[in-house]
Amino acid sequence: MKSFDAIVIGAGQAGPSLTGRLAAAGMQVAMIERHLFGGTCVNTGCMPTKTLVASAYAAQVTRRASEYGVILEREPQIDMPRVNARAVAVSKSSRQSIESSLRGMHGCTVYQGHASFESPTIVRVGDELLTAPRVFLNVGGRASVPDMPGVRDVPFLTNSSILAKTDLPRHLVVVGGSYVGLEFAQMYRRFGAQVTVVEMAPHVISREDEDVSDEIRQILEREGITVRVGATCIGLARHDDEIAVTVDCMQGPPLVVGSDVLLAVGRRPNTDDLGLDRAGVATDKRGYVTVNDDLSTNVPGIWALGDCNGRGAFTHTSYNDYEIVAANLLDGEKRLVTERVTAYALYIDPPLGRVGMTDAQARATGRPLLAAKRPMTKVGRAIEKGETQGFMKVVVDRDTRRILGAAILGTGGDEAIHGLIDAISANLPYDAIQRAVPIHPTVSELIPTLLGDLQPVA
């Protein structure tokens, strides 16, 4: 048995950074990764998908070239193997950099293999036993495959396996109208595939306000994507050489036949084979490790970070988990995950940047509110770029003058939202940024104007 000061299981977003901090503090750290270094973001999430989104955006701008006075003699031709190769190269470069850094790190011993607990302080990797008084779980998650009728009878894709495709589907049916599904839907439509989105809820991305959801649906439909909502009885079956998806919607045909089906209906944590029961680590009914506000588990000396703890599903929240744990253990701070401001983006084009509460959540608090909304058709930067779809909006607590939430659905929305994220994080009254003098021409310059339009919510 080999002894360490700490064991980190999983080289996703939080794991390598935490390993570096612990090693720099003089600890001997075992880093265990069973498959690909970098986790979901680097290998099957942000990096490859946003690389594909960029290729799809280039194709779309080319199609619109004449609107900008640029005349092309023919439609853009999509070379899917080259598109795929670019995404693979971006992921590979980052993955190799992370692995090289860990293997060359003083105080870090890298183990590649499957980790499982033998006890709260003993972890098995293959034939080796490692022990440490501190164990950190950063094992991530994977696509959830629901037990829907016919799912075992037909081939299907997930967000991971679709990245290996080097051919263009004739008709891609996306089951799931949320963040992952909509990004793939738009990119494959722009690559030239016929695309249908099938969603059980009455709206796509149903966690958002209806005006955001409706605008996103219209953006997708303008590009020729068919959106079917209210699909209460989804099932899969073979249909000659293709796949039939039963929809059972209130409107439209009850059956959609496609060449390929992408299941994008949520995620599940990679916790089912870690031997958590042997360590006594508690999980919830979905398999997420139960953690306290400092990300410690019910077992002293064991922490869970990233997607496996159910306290955030993004790369940036995973990294923040590392920051919280490192600050508490090494810097004498008392940071809590409940202090984190919720913020995220949807990377369709134009993107959606979101922070804090939705309008519906703000109204549910019973507080007196102020709100404002501005279409992107009144944003100079959007007009100049010829990208005027969407809007920006904000909701404020009328008494405290603090910003409760905001959404920017429009060109640059994923970047412009950060001014509002910073204001909420710093607990500033909205007046503080309303008086700022932003740069022209930008999308962000309309944030003070938006705040100047605040009106009481009835």
Image: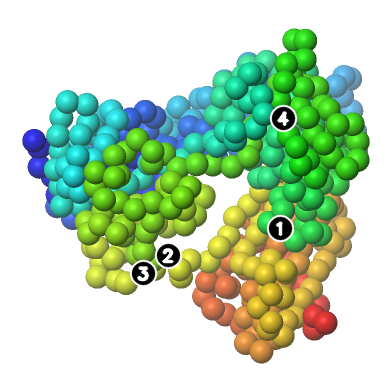
Question: In the picture, which quadrant includes the C terminus?
Answer: bottom right
Disc 3 marks a residue whose amino acid type is Arg
Q: In this view, does 278 lie to the left or right of 293?
A: left
Classify the position of the N terminus by image quarter: top left
Mark 4 and mark 1 lie on one chain; the one further toward the N terminus is 1
Location of residue 430 by image quarter:
bottom right
Instruction: Provide the residue designation for mark 2.
Output: 337
- Residue drawn at x 46%, y 50% as measured from the top left: 285
Q: Around disc 3, counting alpha carbons within 10 Å, would you say few (fewer than 14), some (14 to 19), or many (20 or more)?
A: some
Q: Mark 2: which amino acid?
A: Val
Find disc 3 in the rendering and name its residue. Answer: 335
The disc labelled 1 sits on which kind of residue? Glu
Between disc 1 and disc 2, whose residue precedes? 1
**Mark closest to the chain's N terminus, 1 or 3:** 1
Marks 3/2: CA–CA distance: 7 Å
- Distance, label 1 to label 2, CA atoms, is 22 Å
Nearest the camera: 399 or 351? 399
Q: Is mark 2 on a helix, strand or loop?
A: helix
At which x and y percent is residue 400? 62, 87
Rounded to the nearest angstrom, the CA distance separating label 2 from label 4 is: 38 Å
